[in-house]
Image: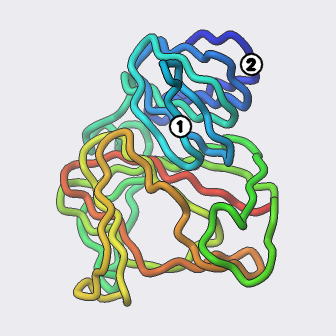
Amino acid sequence: MSRTVNDQLEISADHGIKLSFAARAQELLMNHQMIVVNIGEETAYAEGSPPSALRPFSSRHYQRGSRLTGNNLLLVDLDVIPKKMSCVKQLGWKEFKLDPATNGYGELWKSPRIKIGTIPIDLDIITMPQKGNLGPRLFTVYANFWFASAGSHCGIHDKHDFLEIHTQLYGVGIMQKFRSQKYNSIIEQDILAPGTTTSEPFCSEIAEGEFSYPFHQYFAETDCVWMALEYFLI
């Protein structure tokens, strides 16, 4: 990948996914098909007339030859995506044991965590209504990659000690929300095709570094690979 300007970090593909992180980019050229995630709070732009906006906490599938300008862009090379359970096993991903008590069942595998970088985020902008003024804070961002076989329910839960968004890389998945930890309490579904992201963290409050979420789970409509981006408050 070539670029006109920049602080760009090539991240190892040892775990089967090739990543690049551009803290600052000017007319960044795509030499492959890429999914680009804007992991920061400033809008980025792809060339065009008029330019196409890539909003904060969103992603898009860009073809070879596209150019982007913006900050805090995470690029996933679509030529290097493991698409089978046998592949992720060989790459050293670990099986994640699903708990039937949380409605979890199926096959779920997780890559080692990869550190992306540290960026500022204004919590008042990206989270749901809060008590008080949270304001800008620094977060360290990590990526985890997941594989789930078709039909897998990945477990209904509501606790995280980080902000989280999900980007679909392969297959079709569904982010589901619930009133309780019972599946029949489902209230909302966000369907994820390759290149789409759950567009914002959906936590509702923060206390002592812990974020409160509605009950939710990932469901794999087909065999799926997705990226979970985790923002840890510093």
Discs 2/1, front = 1
SS class, disc 1: strand
Q: Quick one: which residue is furthest to the front in this view?
A: 50
Residue 88 in picture, x, y percent from top left: 35, 41
Residue 64 in picture, x, y percent from top left: 41, 14
Is 100 placed above or below 87 here? below
Residue 57 in picture, x, y percent from top left: 56, 49
Q: Which residue is tagged 2?
A: 6
Q: Amino acid at mark 2?
A: Asn
Q: Residue at x 63, y 77 (%)?
A: 129
SS class, disc 2: strand
User: In front: 179, or 169?
Assistant: 179
Looking at the figure, which quarter contains the N terminus? top right
Residue 167 in picture, x, y percent from top left: 44, 47
Indicate which disc residue 54 carries.
1
Q: Residue at x 35, y 43 (%)?
A: 89
Label 1 environment density (alpha carbons within 10 Å; few <14, some 14–19, many ≥20):
many
Q: Amino acid at mark 1?
A: Leu
Looking at the figure, which quarter contains the C terminus? bottom right
Is 200 placed above or below 92 here? below
Count of all numbered marks drawn on residues in the image: 2
